[in-house]
Image (cartoon, grey):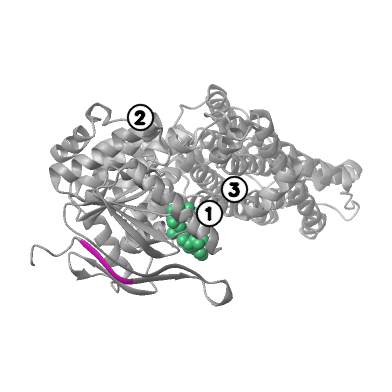
Amino acid sequence: MADDTPALAVQGLTKRHGSGAGAVDALVGIDLAFARGTFTAVMGPSGSGKSTFLACVAGLERPTSGQVLIEGTDVTHWTEARRTRMRRDRIGFVFQDFSLIPYLTAAENVALPARLSGRRAQPEAIRTALARVGLENRAGHLPGALSGGQQQRVAVARALVTGPTVLLADEPTGALDSATARKVLQLLRAAVDDLGQTTVMVTHDPVAASYADDVVFLVDGRVGGRMAAPSVDAVAAQLAHLDQLTGVAR
Amino acid sequence: MTALALRSLRHRPAAAVATFMAALLGTALMASFATLVESALSAHDDDRELLIIMGGIVGGWAALIVLFSVASTVGIVAGQRTREAGLLRTIGATPRQVRALIVYEAGVVALLAASAGAVVASIGGPALFAALQRGDLITAASEYAGGPASLSTAAGAVVLVGTVAAGIASRRATGGPAAFSPRQAEVSALPLRRWRILVGGLLVAVGLASAVVTVTVTGKAGDAYAAMQTSGSASIVVGVGLATLAPGLLRLLATPLRPLLARSGSGHLAAANTTRRAHLLAGTLAPVIVLVSTAVGTLLMIGIDDRTLTAAGDPEGVGGTITMINSVVIGMICLFAAIMVVNAAVAVVAHRRTELDRLWRLGATAGQLRSSIVLEAAVVAFVGILLGLLGSTATAVPYAIVRQEGVVPDGQLWLPPLIALVAAALTIGAAWGAQRRSAR
Ligand SMILES: Nc1ncnc2c1ncn2[C@@H]1O[C@H](COP(=O)(O)OP(=O)(O)OP(=O)(O)O)[C@@H](O)[C@H]1O
Ligand SMILES: [Mg+2]
């Protein structure tokens, strides 16, 4: 495999929810490539298709047409079971609602992907992953006994522990206060810088986006612009502009 | 709150169905027996005793199982409202308002179901009475006299117990913090409440006491049926007592199974669930204990009675009929207990959609989710059968001793494994069916 193959690419990605008169085109022919070791923020007005984009990339939803390529391999038409295994082994996920399993401890949550793959979890790897997010002394706690920020850091540790090809994050700081959010964003940034972790993060927050290398703007299911080396002010200005555009379009 | 309760009911049919089923079938069963007691009041003197025994004593066993099942089901359903309770409180509902909502909802469903159950019993009661008359257990001189008094008493008891149980469970549901989302509020695995340990322990003690009384007092009485009256209830009362302690017992007994399960990914999930979430799964465990304990205990007793009555000198020459009637009546009680096993298993699994979905997003395959649910149900069935068999000895052993068969009955030894098999099949089958609907 050539080294310049993007970690993740989509071609002509289209997703239509429902059919007939009530159909909604959530994504309309998206072409994007995410090079290895890059950190990209996906932004856009509410309903622009950001979550749908991540769901299609992760194999949670099947696109209506177009392709999803993970390290150059087209996974679009894989069976449900095969996409599930792909998700487990090659994609790390961080959700807005943390998505920890409430009856597993922090360490067990981090070990879950390995357990689901039928491997024994490596205690050393689990400890390292928790230490990376600063929670090595919370390993035995159940999620209910952790703060929101701590739970999200456990989720980040779990997403990183398998060394995924791509880390996908859907508004990872959406439920956190700004100080806690900063901590989570620093962790994501560190994973990119130290581990070369390819990361795609959906966010509404210009501050969060400023941690990324690039911003992709989605508008009504289409790519509505890109911005490299985003600053908080530039992103905020662009978002306001897009909101106006869609406001007029409706 | 009323409007909100009714609307929320419409959106949660699965939960309402579980409560409805328990209250409907429970009232039908309980009220049928109650009509016999009401009939006894105006019955011919020769018949009064039998009607009171059948309606009062056997009916009392049924009532115990029914009321426990209703309380247990309502508890499952109300306990599942924790998350929503937290949400309502974040938008300003007081804990009192949330509790009122939960209680009101349970009360409305129980009232509707119990009314329907009373209608069913108004047919079932006369049928039971006619069967007793056909079997010559009561004379033609007596007439069926069940009416609104007995029907509404039984229905009222079901509604009352359902409402009180909802009240207790709602305290737990509103006990958590108001904000739920960041902490994923879930009823945490609190130790058993003291009153619960007390009630459970008391019931077990009462059951054991009737076992002792059977051997030492009633077994030596002249009346061949005196021993049956004290003995029959023992396994039921012990079973209900153990079921009251179900969350603690599940945690305790499932823990040694962990290493066995933890070999596969799905087993690992099942192991964590059965121990750390015993308070949720106990909802399925309780009816399994009651079913096995009741069915094995009382059916063995009927078998022993049938084998030894002639030797015991069948005083009135009606042994065969009594065995038949007993089998039918106990069969109905066991059938109710069996339906409650399915009812509870479905209610518990149906609520886990969000969690299964979350696991699926993280890469658990459909097969892994399925086997983790099935393994969990298997652990619950195993523990329930173990405890149920234990409870059944409270009836079977004393009665075997009294009827000179020794500690172990002389026949029907196929019965315990058969009931165990049925209980396991029901528990696992119901969980399997329910996960098919709640997984994608
Ligand atoms: N299951 C579904 N059925 C029908 N329409 C859907 C479904 N899921 C999403 N949509 C529609 O698709 C469009 C894109 O939704 P999506 O959730 O991807 O938006 P988003 O950009 O993530 O919005 P937000 O910022 O509010 O999270 C919306 O118009 C939404 O209503
Ligand atoms: Mg979204």
Q: Mark 2 belongs to which amino acid?
A: Ala
Residue type at mark 3 is Asp
Q: Which residue is mark 2?
A: A179
**Label drawn at residue A37:** none
Separation of marks 1 and 2 at Cα, in angstroms: 43 Å
Residue at position x 61%, y 29% in the image: B171
In which quadrant of the rendered view does residue B254 lie?
top left
- Tags 1 and 2 both on a single chain: no
The residue tagged with tag 2: helix, strand or loop? helix
**Real-space CA distance between mark 3 and mark 1, rounded to the nearest whole angstrom:** 36 Å
Q: Nearer the viewer, residue B102 or B126?
A: B102
Instruction: Say which quarter of the image contains residue B251.
Output: top left
| Local SS, label 1 | helix
Badge number at residue B346: 1
**Circle 3 is placed at which residue position?**
B305
* Residue at image location 34% in from the left, 60% down from the top: A225
Task: Name the residue nearer the viewer: A171 or A115.
Answer: A171
Q: Looking at mark 2, is its residue's CB closer than 8 Å to ligand 1?
A: no
Mark 2 belongs to which subunit? A
Residue B259 seen in the figure: no
Q: Within the magenta stretch, is there residue B346?
A: no
Residue B387 in percent (x, y) is at: 45, 40
For the residues labelled 1 and 2, say whether their Cβ atoms are less than 8 Å apart.
no
Q: Between residues B303 and A238, which one lies in front from this camera angle?
A: A238
From the viewer's perspective, is residue A47 above or below residue B297? below
Q: Amino acid at mark 1?
A: Val
